[in-house]
Every structure is written in structure tokens, then in C-alpha cells.
Amino acid sequence: MLHAPREFRLWFLRGLADSDGDVHFRDKSVDITTSPNTGFVKALLDSLNVHCVVRFTRGYGAMTIRADQAMRIAIFNPEVNTYRRELLEKLVGASVYPRRWPSWLEEKVGHLGRLGLNKREICERILNENNTYIKMHGLGRKIGTEMRCSHRV
């Protein structure tokens, strides 16, 4: 398999990802459960020039691939609109504000926080409605600051 044409290796990997893969919103990555073939899947990804991180959790191996690299090789079947593929495409194509957020984003996050949405729900709503990715990590501070400021008024 490692010496098969590139397209065959890609389709094999896509089949594996479609059945045992997942998209992680939190860190914009794709995981594929690979046990008991972790070494083989690592070699397959290496043969396609895809960087991955190998993890073992509770005895099960998995590969983590950055979302942009997963998108580059169309890790999920490009001919079928699955939830995983659509989420990956949204994450990779979304706008990101690494420093200061624009005022509209600050206001919308504050509004959604006041509505009682949790961090994940806020992030997903912003992604789906505004094509903007925000990290959940710093969101707690933003919501907390917004809530403290609104209580002072």
C-alpha cells in the first residue's frame, strides 16, 4: 500500500477518516483512530507529506492532523457532503482575529453570553453565522468581563 499510486493512498486514508475520524473545533484539527495499525497509518501519512502527531490514549493509537493539512489532502471524501467535511471546510475557511476583535464580534459574543449560551455554542454560532473562528480558550474571559461590566451599569 505504501508504494501504491498517490491517489490510491489518499482514497484509503479518506475511507479510514470517514469511518474513524473526527474534527476538533477547539484546536482546529482532525483525529483518526488508528489502532491497531498506528505505525502503518503514520507511514502512510508520511508518504503523502502530511505531518501528524501520534497519540496513545488508554492503549488506543490516534493521529492528529492540523485542519489546514487535512483540508489540503481532502481527508474526508470530497464527493460526499458529510458533517465532518463541512465543519472542516468551515474551520479552514473562516476569518480569524488573533489580536483585538472588531466591535461587532465583541458585541455579538457578549449578547450570546447574556443569552446563556455556553462557550462551544457561542463559537459554533459565530462560525456558522459570521464565518469567523474564535478560540474557546479566551472566550471565558471575554464573557466574564462583559457580564461584570453589564452588572455595574
Image: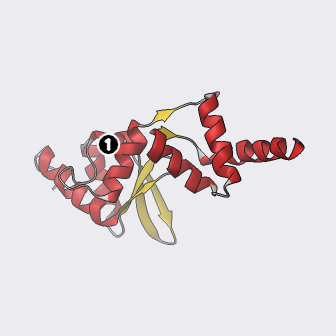
Q: Is residue 115 left or right of residue 38?
A: right
Q: Residue furthest front?
A: 153
Q: Quadrant of residue 102?
A: top right
Callout 1 secondary element: helix
Q: Which residue is more in the foreground, 112 or 95?
A: 112
Residue 17: x, y in percent?
30, 59
Q: Residue at x 49, y 38 (%)?
A: 132
| Above or below, 134 relative to 15 | above
In the figure, is residue 66 to the left or right of 78? right
The residue that disc 1 covers is 71
State the residue lying farthest toward the right.
Answer: 152
Q: For this rendering, which residue is in front, 48 or 84?
A: 84
Kind of residue indicated by mark 1: Met
Q: Looking at the picture, how far across and down is residue 57, in whole percent?
A: 51, 67
Q: Residue at x 60, y 32 (%)?
A: 104
Task: From the viewer's perspective, tell me whether residue 84 is left or right of residue 16.
Answer: right
Visual colour scheme: secondary structure
- Screen quadrant of the N terminus: bottom left
Q: Residue at x 87, y 41 (%)?
A: 153
Task: Determine whether 96 is above or below 47 in the image.
Answer: above
Q: Residue at x 48, y 63 (%)?
A: 56
Residue density around tag 1, few if under 14, some if 14–19, many if 20 or more, within 10 Å: many
Which one is in front, 138 or 115?
115
What is the number of callouts on the image? 1
